[in-house]
């Protein structure tokens, strides 16, 4: 089984292919692969619990998927930790660097 | 043991938040004692252009000195300093053809000229390759 | 050698003044430099395979873009290196493009994308 890191810089409100990426991530997970989704820049807009984002809440329930959100991107956009989905991991660029360089993990910027 | 990240940047200065995120990632990677190779492609070749200048801000009514407008060439220079302090390898390759068509061949100290062969070599020699492409 | 899938999604971005698609060009240049790289066209980039693309030269005063690219020809040139070009079938259908409009490349269903990309060591997304 493979490991993936998708760095999602775009949001599903402006970019339809973000939803398609979420679908791909779900399918990779169902096939047994380990997927890290790292939300950065406007990708952080998906993190609000009250945002109407297709597929995103389902991703958070999958065991093979871990979703991170960049703390800098949250603060820049005034999104507090109380506003975001509980199972999201608030992360930082150091952890992003670790994920990118993690043995066996394929990084993809989206 | 130090790992090597190979990263391709494409966005020109002041046009995309990809630039700040990528440079943050590069800095974090260097600070952790890893090596980084940057391939600056297309508009990203202007990130290191020596002749960038700051300016005052008439909307905010700040002077040149007060505004302290960030210049991406300074970020590039700063990353070289980080690498030097951490004693890790940091290479910045500006795509030569892209440089020529944009006329940004006068860059700060550090970057070198290159092309796809250098990028492919970096892909083969590094642990990971990340493409940060311009979209739309 | 590591295999690379170059996923080209963005289309017609600055392609007139570049006289190229820079993602397509770069992928081909990497192939020429020895990379084992193949292309997947997604989103609007599926249109690059349409046989009837025929941009006219662009004239601005006395200046001009004399040879705008026909990307289906660039893709055919790329396939002659031995590398493959694929496209996402649903992206074609969504855009109302029939497969008979395309050069001879292979379509894959979005539902097979996860398995498809897993065959590659590196995924580049443009």
Image: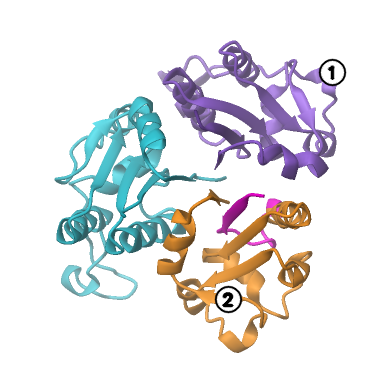
Chain colours: A orange, B cyan, C purple
Q: Secondary structure at mark 2?
A: strand
The mark closer to the camera, 1 or 2, is: 2
Residue C80 sits in quarter: top right
| Residue C100 disc label | 1
Q: Secondary structure at mark 1?
A: helix
Q: Residue B123's x, y, as percent? A: 41, 36
Relative to B72, say whether C36 is above or below: above
A7 inside magenta stretch = yes
CB under 8 Å between discs 1 and 2: no
Q: Residue at the spot x=71%, y=55% of the render?
A: A25
State the residue position of label 2.
A89
Protein chain holding label 1: C
Relative to A68, say whether C22 is above or below: above
Relative to C41, say whether B133 is above or below: below
Q: Which residues are magenta?
A: A1-17
Q: Residue at the spot x=22%, y=53% of the render?
A: B88
Please name whichever residue, C118 or C97, is drawn nearer the observer in this view of the structure: C118
CA gap, disc 1 and disc 2: 47 Å
- Pointer 1: residues within 10 angstroms few (<14), some, or many (20+)? few
A31 inside magenta stretch = no
Left/right placement of residue A55 relative to residue C45 reads right
- Check the picture and name the quadrant holding the C terminus of chain C: top right
- Pointer 2: residues within 10 angstroms few (<14), some, or many (20+)? some
């Amino acid at each position: 089984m493979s490991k993936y890191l998708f760095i999602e810089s775009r949001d599903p409100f402006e970019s339809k292919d973000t939803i398609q990426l979420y679908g791909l991530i779900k399918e990779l997970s169902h096939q047994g692969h380990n997927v890290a989704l790292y939300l950065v820049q406007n990708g952080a807009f998906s993190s609000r619990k009250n945002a109407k984002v297709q597929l995103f809440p389902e991703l958070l329930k999958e065991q093979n998927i871990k979703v991170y959100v960049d703390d800098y991107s949250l603060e820049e956009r005034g999104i507090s930790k109380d506003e975001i989905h509980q199972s999201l991991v608030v992360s930082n660029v150091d952890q992003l660097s670790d994920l990118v360089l993690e043995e066996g993990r394929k990084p993809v910027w989206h | 043991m130090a790992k090597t990240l190979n990263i391709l940047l494409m966005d020109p200065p002041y046009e995309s938040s990809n630039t700040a995120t990528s440079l943050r990632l590069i800095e974090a990677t260097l600070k952790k004692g890893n090596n980084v190779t940057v391939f600056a492609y297309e508009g990203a070749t202007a990130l290191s252009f020596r002749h960038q200048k700051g300016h005052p801000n008439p909307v905010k009514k700040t002077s040149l000195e007060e505004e302290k407008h960030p210049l991406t060439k300074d970020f590039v220079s700063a990353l070289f300093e980080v690498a030097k302090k951490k004693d890790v390898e940091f290479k910045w390759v500006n795509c030569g053809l892209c440089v020529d068509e944009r006329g940004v061949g006068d860059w700060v100290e550090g970057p070198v000229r290159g092309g796809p062969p250098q990028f492919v070599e970096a892909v083969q020699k590094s642990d990971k390759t990340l493409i940060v492409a311009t979209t739309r | 050698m590591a295999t690379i899938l170059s996923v080209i999604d963005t289309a017609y971005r600055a392609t007139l003044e570049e006289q190229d698609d820079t993602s397509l060009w770069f992928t081909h240049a990497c192939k020429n430099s020895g990379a084992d790289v193949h292309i997947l066209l997604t989103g609007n980039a599926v249109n690059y395979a349409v046989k009837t693309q025929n941009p006219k030269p662009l004239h601005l005063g006395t200046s001009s873009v004399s040879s705008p690219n026909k990307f289906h020809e660039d893709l055919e040139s790329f396939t002659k290196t031995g590398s493959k070009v694929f496209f996402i079938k649903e992206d074609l259908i969504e855009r109302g493009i029939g497969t008979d409009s395309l050069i001879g490349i292979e379509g894959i269903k979005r539902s097979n994308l996860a398995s498809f990309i897993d065959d590659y060591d590196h995924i580049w997304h443009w």
